[in-house]
Image: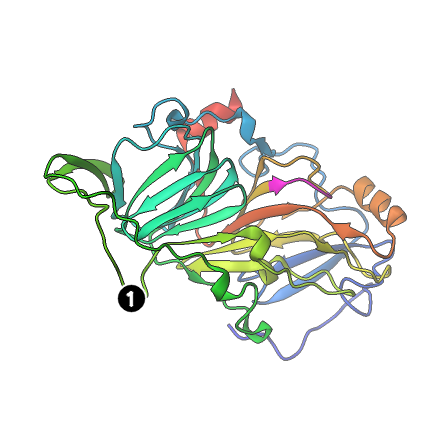
Amino acid sequence: MRPAWFHLAKGSYPRQARVGVGELYEEHVSRLGFTGAVAMLYHRRGATEFVSVDPELSPPPVAVKRLVALDATDPSALPLALYENDDLTLLWSQRQQPHPFAVRNLDGDQLMFVHSGTGLLETEFGSLSYRSGDFLYIPKAVTYRVIPEGPNEVLIIETRSQIEPFDIGAAGRHAPFDPTVLEIPDPSPHEESEPGEFPVMYKRNGRYLRAVLRHDPFDVLGWKGDLFPFRLHIDDILPIHSERSHLAPSIGGIFCGDGFVVSNLLPQPAVSDLEAEELPDYHRNAEYDEFWCIHNGGGLFEDGGQLVYTPQGMVHGTTEEVRKAHQQHRREGDRRTVTAVGVEARKPLCPTAEYLKQIES
């Protein structure tokens, strides 16, 4: 749907949205994430303070240290599935030991975000070393193994469609990152070995099926084409910001696919115009569920290592007290310090039974 040519305004409102709001409380109601029809509502009081609310509508943040994934102690086990819908599954891995077999996912692409830890991602195309803050992309049907160097914490985004770069249009081809910063693997075949037994676990229709190859799958001497895994560190992503406007989170989009967008929040200068709103407004995302992994804390999220989920249509934002205190202490030259990775899902995300069991205990 194209944006309307004309916006209407009724009652009490500032001349410019997000600027000179004063004693009003601004709520942003948006369709299609932040690209469709929009309404700014100006309340007497804050819009997020519940007397009571069903936890399914407003679940509290979850500290990742509370989670227990089976792959933390059993190298053959799977990560903990968090949320899922028809387009994607979000999982949390705490792997400490190498996969004892190769893996080939036939259900879709995988994008891993390394919250903590280091290690090696071994693929048919070659190997990629990784560290905290790395994105690792594994295309559908590519064979791989994860070889951690001690405990790891990894968010895994498994998608049914192909993951592609998010187009932020007029920002140009080198935003939000220069494509040449991607680390692409060079062939690193295992030493030649005699025929033997090389187990591979194939994920198909949500099930893992075992096959044993006669030859080592990691024996590739060379490759060419436009299908390959890669590594991208979050520090190589360049935030786009404004001195006078708090830009919508969609400006931080980095990857997308059918029914989802992967975004980030990065350290950057705060809005310096003290008449303009620096904190995000109250937001009612009519079309997308929002999931955020807070990597490093800052601002509204003092502590890193939190998972934050908001169902579509639910208002989210800080309390009146926090908003007033922040406005009183703002100074030119302030900076935002939070680092986070987010997933916006068009279809509602459903928490898994095991995840609910862990966070409700």
Residue 258 position within the rendered picture, expressed as x and y whole percent measured from the top left:
39, 59
Mark 1 belongs to which amino acid? Gly
Callout 1: few (<14), some (14-19), or many (20+) C-alpha neighbours within 10 Å? few
Asked whether residue 192 appears in the rendered view, the answer is yes
Q: Residue furthest bottom?
A: 5
Q: Residue at x 60, y 62 (%)?
A: 251
* Magenta stretch contains residue 101: no
Residue 101 position within the rendered picture, expressed as x and y whole percent measured from the top left:
25, 34
Residue 312 position within the rendered picture, expressed as x and y whole percent measured from the top left:
54, 49
Q: Residue furthest top?
A: 361
Which element type, helix, strand or loop, lies under badge 1? loop
Asked whether residue 314 appears in the rendered view, the answer is no
| Most common SS among magenta residues | loop
126 left or right of 286 in image: left
Region rendered in magenta: 295-299
Instruction: Say which quarter of the image contains residue 66.
Output: top right
**Color encoding of the figure:** rainbow
Q: Residue furthest front?
A: 191
Q: Residue at x 64, y 47 (%)?
A: 315
Q: Which residue is mark 1?
A: 225
Q: Residue at x 33, y 58 (%)?
A: 228
Instruction: Say which quarter of the image contains residue 221.
Output: bottom left
In terms of depth relative to the viewer, which is nearer, 162 or 30? 162
117 left or right of 328 in image: left
175 left or right of 334 in image: left
89 left or right of 326 in image: left
337 to 198, vertically: above or below: below
* Magenta stretch contains residue 296: yes
Residue 232 position within the rendered picture, expressed as x and y whole percent measured from the top left:
49, 54
273 to 317, vertically: above or below: below
How many numbered tags mark residues here?
A: 1
